[in-house]
Image (spheres, rainbow, N blue to C red):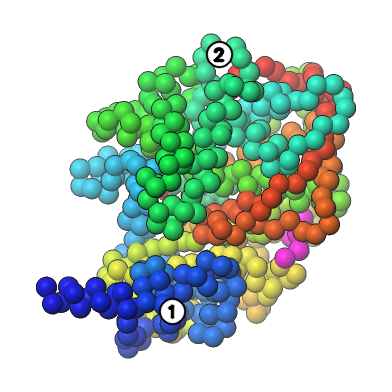
Amino acid sequence: MAVISCDIKRHLLGSRTRRAKEPPLVKGWPYFGVILDYGKNPLAFLQAMRQKHGDIFTCQLAGKHFTFVTDPFSFSAVMRQGKNLDFHKFAMGFSQRVFGHCDFTSSLYTEAYREVHSLFIQTLQGPSLQRLSQNMLGNLQTAFQHCKPSGNGWKEDGLQCFTTRIMFEAGFVTLFGKQAGLLQPEGTGSVGHKVKEDFLEFDGAFPALAAGIPIALCRRAWRAREALAKKLLHGELHHRMCISDLIQRRMDAFDRMHLNETEKARTNVCMLWASQANTLPAAFWSLYYTLRTPEAFAAAYKEVELIMAQLPNDTPISLSKEQLESMTVLESIIREALRLSSASIMIRLASDDFILTMDSGQEAAIRKGDYIALYPRLIHLDPDIYPNPMEFMYNRFLDKNGERRSQFYKNGRQVKHYLVPFGSGASECPGRFFAMNEIKLFLMVVLWHYDLQLNEPQGTLSPDRTRAGLGILPPSQDVLLQYRIRADRYMERSREKEF
Ligand code: HEM
């Protein structure tokens, strides 16, 4: 009992003492540690701590100790520690708390869940990727058709609203299929609009949920999550057509695990969130930077024109894998937008005491129960790797011949993990190739079918830092977009489908 109360006291008072070989310990408030300074601006805080303490240091954040590794050359050293550093326990704990599904790390489910997990690669990569991308392209064209302005005049909308409306609908239908027999297109009062609004309500609560606030206290988010789950019950999905292999095979696997219907539906909400939460802001920034940078727009448009010239113009657009891969300018634009807007944190839980050997040879003792954290934004905005790091350069990821560039250097040494918006190692996003394709296709269709211009007040749009740690930062506010349809191109290729 005495030991327990001593432990609680130490925890509350924050009186941890640094042991031999442990990284420098950043002092903060009892229990809360440095949460306020970190929360205000994680990037600035970590840069300042790196300056003061070096490449590795430990901070207390709301009762938990996080050891930040800030040296890009030591990323691999962390990734190699699969035995001592656990990704799934932390991720599953968070997922379970936020999405309300059962604990798949429990021995009851571990074996069956391994099979579910392996479906990501089987259905999002390799041969499945082309089919999925092709479906996305068809659904994008339908989504554009649903929200096309009447007549040929200019229309105004927020760029974020515009992007979200189209990408959400197309992405949703691509994974979860379209409602069989529904004649009403997406629009006011339809199923699609409500699903999108619920998604945005739920997603909006993520900073609070990540800070540890129970979802039961975020009433609107909780209601939105439950409404989404209702929509994604297996019984409902059985009425939809063209469901992706990913969702169909997950449904089959979860049916075999004998979960209750609500729990199964909540795993679908989880999948919906993973597939949309980062893709929507990434698509926004990609289009935003393209439209506000004349050279980017010109190069992107030229590339799209080249592709379109190869296609018959009396059928909906359809691309081969090679055509999709050949759009290196669009790819560079997206990668640059990801570099500037990505703020995910990679977190691992130390399952044992162990020694982490940094790239420099420095040895750091890591305590069992502590977290190791990598913040790739430090790399993405490092001026030694990316000159003028805050500037959008559409061709940063192209070499002199217009081919993909994949060699970046710091102090003359090649950096392996130079762009990590999709995570790395055990937590690397299995949907990364699909996400890149989705955004590429979105840019292609929108640039081809619309005249677009931003009506932006002076100054640069800043990202919403309250979401730092959660992935791609959305903009802090929307930007006015004026657009009109290129009637000559639109009608002949479009086709009607329902959301
Ligand atoms: C630009 C878009 C995207 C970005 C930046 C992104 C980024 C990430 C990151 C950083 C993680 C690791 C999270 C962690 O460490 O806890 C992750 C995981 C994941 N992502 Fe993505 N993602 C994107 C799009 C997608 C899409 C389109 C899908 C699926 C259709 C998807 C499916 C997943 C899944 C299933 C996981 C969890 C993997 C696991 O548990 O092993 N993502 N994503």
Answer with left or right where residue 268 lies relative to residue 415.
left
Magenta-colored span: 390-396
Q: Residue furthest bottom?
A: 20
Whether residue 435 appears in this view of the structure is yes
**Residue at point 69% right, 50% down?**
477
For residue 182, the mark is 2
Q: Secondary structure at mark 1?
A: loop
The first of marks 2 and 1 along the sequence is: 1
Crowd around label 1: few <14 · some 14–19 · many ≥20 (10 Å): some
**Horizontal and vertical percent for residue 280?**
61, 43
Answer with left or right where residue 98 lies relative to residue 384.
left
Res. 18 image quadrant: bottom left
Q: Which marked residue is nearer to the observer: mark 2 or mark 1?
A: 1
Position of the C terminus, as image quadrant, is top right
Position of the N terminus, as image quadrant, is bottom left
Q: Any atom of ligand 1 within 8 Å of the CB at mark 1?
A: no
Above or below, comparing residue 378 to residue 491 in the picture: below
For residue 28, the mark is 1
For residue 459, the mark is none
Residue 383 vs residue 234, the one in the foreground: 234
**Residue at point 61% right, 30% down?**
170
**Residue at point 46% right, 74% down?**
34
Question: What kind of secondary structure does the magenta stretch mostly adopt?
Answer: loop
Crowd around label 2: few <14 · some 14–19 · many ≥20 (10 Å): some
Answer with left or right where residue 208 lies relative to residue 130.
left
Identify the amino acid type marked 1.
Gly
